[in-house]
Amino acid sequence: MLTLLCSPKSFVDESAWNQLNALRSWRAIHPDAEIIIFGAPQGATEAAAEVGATLVTEFATSSSGAPSFNAMVAHANQYGRHDLIVYANCDILLNTTMLRAMQAARQRFETFLLVGERLDLAEGVAVDVRQPNWTGHMSALASEGKLTAHGPTGADYFGFVRGMWADLPPVFMGRAMCDQALLHYCLRKRLPLIDGTLAVVNVHQYHGYSHVAGGREQVFRGNDREDMAKAHGLWHSLPTVADAGWRIEQGGGILPDRKRRHLLRRLELQLRYARRSAGIATVIRGLQYLFGKHALRAYQWPVSLVVSSWQ
């Protein structure tokens, strides 16, 4: 079974609908799924009561208030009911495909990180997960241009097993660099990194950045990002979902996935992480620039393919 973690914003304005809608979708995954909400923003007590979640009000954050992934994982390791754990941003709509994908990954690997590319709802578009077969509307929204593929540069859920991350340098969620830091850790540790884009329903609801003091600038260029970059040694050639070595399909099959990246990118990753030859890896990165954009950019799953796979 599954434990889901999140660290929501205040439940006000658009965030009230987005986050409660997301939590409702998580609750529908399975009656015994455990939801743990970290923090005490406005409306969190009421939201936790509606979906039967546990509320943890005291835990570590950065100096700017960004929630500590390390602290949330430590709590789940000690007090969570289930060995399969997912941290997800609290505006992400999920369904039972998440549980099936996590179970399939655990059958194949002892430890792993499951991530996936999200599909983005356009501004002003709402999907009510209380409606029967709400995922069945995704094709129509995609054909109308109201649901688009985000691509491999952002991950909004992270599925893993209890006991991982023991020596993880600090990661603060809701800030740029947090997802790259987690991917980098797994690549460095040579833990299986699995792309669940085609298997896991993962819909992002539109939002702004007014919930963060400093807004978008603080999220993408603030001190938290810089602190994570230093702690993890991440300055260039950042990992993305497309760097996953494995792909999980709709039916639960897990296959090696080496075709989404140019040969030079695969060589760079091999040198950087498996051979620990950072200098040579940097040279290979430079060669990718010489080969042009096709060598630098990963193949992006088309929204039509993703939606059809979900269905």
Image (cartoon, rainbow, N blue to C red):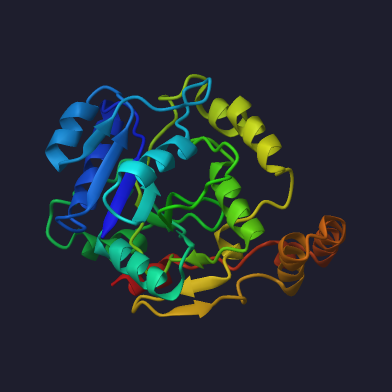
What residue is rendered at 53% in x and 72% in y?
246
Q: Is residue 63 left or right of residue 5?
A: right
Residue 295 visible at all: yes
Query: Which residue shows up at 50% across the image and 25% down it?
Result: 215
Residue 41 image position (x, y, % from top left):
30, 24
Left or right: residue 8 versus residue 134 is: right
Q: Quadrant of the N terminus?
A: bottom left
Residue 90, visible in the rendered structure: no
On screen, residue 62 versus residue 259, left or right, reads left
Name the residue located 67 percent from the left edge and 51 percent from the top edge.
238
* Residue 284 relative to residue 72: left or right: right
Residue 291 to residue 146: above or below: below
Q: Quadrant of residue 186?
A: bottom right
The quarter of the rendered structure image containing the C terminus is bottom left
User: How far from the left and from the top, in percent, is residue 214?
Assistant: 52, 20
Residue drawn at (42%, 72%) of the image: 305
In the image, residue 9 sits, relative to residue 104, either above or below, namely above
Nearest the viewer among 158 and 169 is 169
Displayed quadrant of residue 291: bottom right
Task: Report the label total.
Answer: 0
Instruction: Where is residue 46? Give x, y as percent.
Output: 16, 29
Is 148 or 217 nearer to us in this picture? 217
Q: Nearer the viewer, residue 285 or 103?
A: 103
Q: Residue 177: which quarter of the image?
A: top right
Residue farthest front in this picture: 78
